[in-house]
């Protein structure tokens, strides 16, 4: 009768734990850096704050433009507003007027 001696190997015991560690590392990496991960959440929140600031600026500009257009509607047309806009568009002034040139604000 023949008997075989089997040597116990430790590598068989490490296969399942090493696979588990690899899976956990893979999913952990993508939980942080993935498209819907933690890092992306903070980046999207910062982008939301930036875009909200731009939206507020555009809304304020729109309200200002709507107010100026309202001044030029028929029936409420103000002569001073019309005079100012025409002089600005044509770059003209009367001979007896003093013109003060101011730098335009940065946009």
Image (cartoon, rainbow, N blue to C red):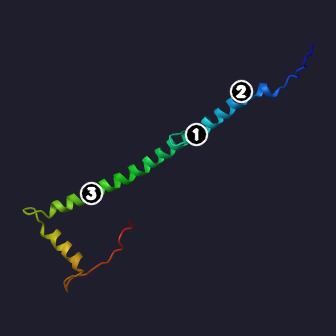
Work out whether 77 lies above or below 37: below
Work out whether 49 lies above or below 18: below
Mark 2 or 3, which is nearer the eye?
Answer: 2
- What residue appears at the point 43 percent right and 47 percent down from the top-left corner? 49
Q: Which residue is mark 3?
A: 62
The quarter of the picture where the C terminus appears is bottom left
What element does badge 2 sit on?
helix
Location of residue 1 in the rendering, given as x and y in whole percent from the top left corner: 92, 13
Mark 1 or 2, which is nearer the eye?
Answer: 2
Residue 49 is marked as none
Looking at the picture, tell me which residue is in the foreground, 85 or 29.
29
Give the mark nearer the N terminus: 2 vs 3.
Answer: 2
Disc 1 and disc 3: Cα gap in Å?
42 Å
Which class describes the residues within 10 Å of circle 3: few (<14), some (14-19), or many (20+)?
Answer: few
Mark 1 or 3, which is nearer the eye?
Answer: 1
Q: Which residue lies most toward the top here?
A: 1
Quadrant in which residue 85 is drawn:
bottom left
């Amino acid at each position: 009768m023949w008997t075989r001696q089997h040597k116990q190997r430790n590598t068989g015991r490490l296969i399942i734990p090493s696979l588990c560690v690899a899976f956990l590392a893979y999913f952990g990496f993508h939980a942080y850096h993935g498209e819907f991960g933690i890092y992306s959440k903070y980046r999207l929140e910062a982008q939301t704050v930036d875009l909200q600031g731009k939206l507020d600026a555009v809304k304020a500009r729109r309200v200002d433009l709507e107010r100026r257009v309202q001044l030029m509607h028929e029936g409420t047309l103000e002569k001073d507003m019309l005079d100012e806009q025409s002089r600005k568009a044509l770059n003209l002034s009367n001979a007896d007027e003093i013109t003060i040139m101011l730098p335009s604000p940065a946009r």
